[in-house]
Image (cartoon, rainbow, N blue to C red):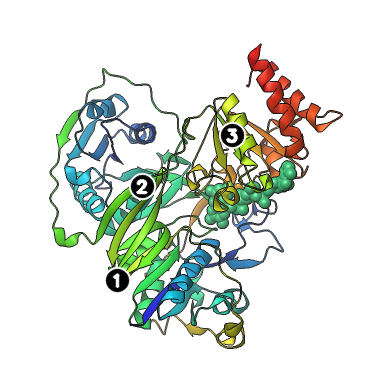
Amino acid sequence: MSLHIIVCAKQIIDPEGPASGYGVNSDTGQIILPKGVPPAINPYDENALETALKIKDAWQARITVISVGKNLSKAVMGKALKAGADNLVFLQDKSFENLDSRSTAYVISEGIKKLGDYDLVLAGRQAGDTDSAVVPHYIAGFLDIPCINLIKKVELFEKSIRVERSLPDGYEVLEVGMPSLLSITGGGDLRKADLQQTGGAGNKPAVIWTAKDLEIESSVLKKISWEKIFVPDYEVECNYIKADSYKEAGAKLAVKLREDQIL
Amino acid sequence: MTAFSGITVFDSVSEDKLMSGTIELLACARKLADGFNEKVNCILFGEGLNKTLKEAVAFGADNVFVADDPLLKKYNPDVYSITLDRIVRQTAPRCIILGQTSTGADIAPRLAFKLGCDLVTDCVEINVNKETDSIIPIHPIYGGKIHAAFSPLGSQLVLTLRQKSIEPLERDDSRKGEIIPVKVNIDPALIRIKVVKKIKEETEGIRLENAPVVVSGGRGIGSKENFKHLKELAGILNGAVGGSRPATDNGWVPATSKVGLTGKIVAPNVYIAIGISGSSQHLAGCIGSKNIVAINNDPAANIFRVSRYGVVGDWEEILPGFTEKLRELNAL
Ligand SMILES: Cc1cc2nc3c(=O)[nH]c(=O)nc-3n(C[C@H](O)[C@H](O)[C@H](O)COP(=O)(O)OP(=O)(O)OC[C@H]3O[C@@H](n4cnc5c(N)ncnc54)[C@H](O)[C@@H]3O)c2cc1C
């Protein structure tokens, strides 16, 4: 048996970048993103890819990474091929920019249908820019396959999958058949480039499918729309405790917190 | 005029006790319903529910729809979402609010997909715009660096509310409400996911979510071994130990101790952040704390911008003096 695993991955501005530089253009009401923060694969999607690669370590499997957007970068998303994915598919079109969760999931599900047979669809639990954690469920909805979220571990059997789902007070073990969609919250960091792949599949071009290829009318797609955006302000004045030595500074902090009836 | 009316709250109940999150949802629904002069319907799932139902009324519900069934004792995504979808269709609310919890955040998209309506998850505030007869949810994006108010949305909405984003209402046992039992009736063929077992991994001592003091460590703590100093401090302060994502990902503290956007939301009286830079995603889980105290060797660390008290320096040198002095003060 050879498995086909599809991993959904989003290209976003590196979410680990500093908070400074984010703002709102007061004329247009649009978001100002910091300059010089490079795009990256959404970190949770990297966890999903690593989960797929671990399955591929143990089973005969082929991995297709699929992404939707307007300007997808081979330099950024190609990291997936270097790590060991077999194919990269860009669903790329002018009309695919800034789609809401439902439209994003619709386009991805159409891309998946065009790919043909598959056994598993993996996605990261949420994207680090829109932070909604909705698209995986909607993809499963459009494909009419079961969906489980918050997965930290996947174990495959011949006909079924056993997963561990994170909970606030532990985790639960669930079983589901194939094909299914699994939305991933753990599973380890994405492995470094696979040298064999770097020379071979790593250089493969991405397959590009446009709205026309997918037979998607732009009129069925909806964009995200915000009435208002703003930068939250949590800043408070910090009372810095200083002393001649660090040990004393620690003691002084304790005394100060007691004086102010905080501790 | 829309055909949809009323605000519906959904939550599950275990051991016949309303969770604090449910009470927050009721407070939020009450605020919205009063804005439109409409009703609050509360849908509760569980087994052996009794006094919870009156409690839901006391905290703001006008009607309580209760599905009390052994099938609902444990969360199963299929069973829950199919049952909830059925009840929601009967009540046709303009808005359904769930908690941004492992259960709520999993059912909300299933429900919104079935209903074909708009969905905004992880809201930190939900307001009414009377002029446009609409609801305006605020959802943080880019890890919380920006907040976005969504509108216009369709005439029916599913929302999830971040925990601890609203003050609960005072309990009022004189409030009147109707209790409406609903039957659970599911075609077994529709259940595709099997829940095998649940493994509890709770740490001993006071629960992180309820602790008045949280001592939290980040990447700067450096090792599991080093966390014992944070545990010692938490012990003295009757507090709980938390961690940032690097601390939980590295296994220095259990995954259940993660504070932040994708971890727990805490709002203690005092949050002591040690070796934590203060990323927006981390702050999402602790910004509601009354007092943040930071120890960090980088004077430019973002955590100092939200802290009332701060010491710049190496925690390994600062913490012993702090802990020792607190012990001394406690002994007085
Ligand atoms: C979608 C998404 C969700 C996320 N969810 C969460 C979440 O829920 N919770 C979370 O925490 N993160 C989350 N993150 C990760 C987040 O972006 C940051 O990477 C993380 O919070 C950083 O943790 P940290 O502050 O411990 O580490 P760092 O940012 O590396 O900071 C370590 C700090 O320790 C200080 N330090 C080092 N040594 C010492 C010393 N000896 N003494 C004193 N100080 C020292 C350094 O100056 C530095 O400020 C999420 C990210 C994404 C993309």
Image quarter hosting the C terminus of chain A: top right
Vertical relation: B22 (above or below) B132: above
Q: Which of B85 and A224 is in front in this view?
A: B85
Numbered circle sitting on residue B92:
none
Numbered circle sitting on residue B231:
3
Q: Is residue B159 left or right of residue B87?
A: right
Q: What residue type is labelled 1?
A: Met
| Residue A123 at x, y percent in the picture | 44, 66
Q: Nearer the viewer, residue B170 or B53?
A: B53
Q: Is residue A243 left or right of residue B19?
A: right
Q: Give a yes or no on whether discs 2 and 1 share a subunit.
A: no
Q: Is mark 1 on a helix, strand or loop?
A: loop
Query: Residue at (41%, 68%) from the top-left corner?
Result: A122
Tell me if I can see residue B154 in this picture: no
Q: What residue type is labelled 2?
A: Ile
Figure quadrant of residue A233 = top right
Q: Nearer the viewer, residue A10 or B210?
A: B210
Can you identify the residue that label 2 sits on? B199
Q: How crowded is mark 1: few (under 14 residues within 10 Å), some or many (20 or more)?
A: some
Q: Mark 3 lies on which chain?
A: B
Q: Residues within 10 Å of mark 2 (few under 14, many from 20)?
A: few
Can you identify the residue that label 1 sits on? A178
Q: What element carries label 3?
A: helix
Q: Is residue A156 left or right of residue A63?
A: left
How far is disc 3 from disc 1 in space, using C-alphas? 44 Å
Query: Residue at (87%, 29%) from the top-left corner?
Result: A244
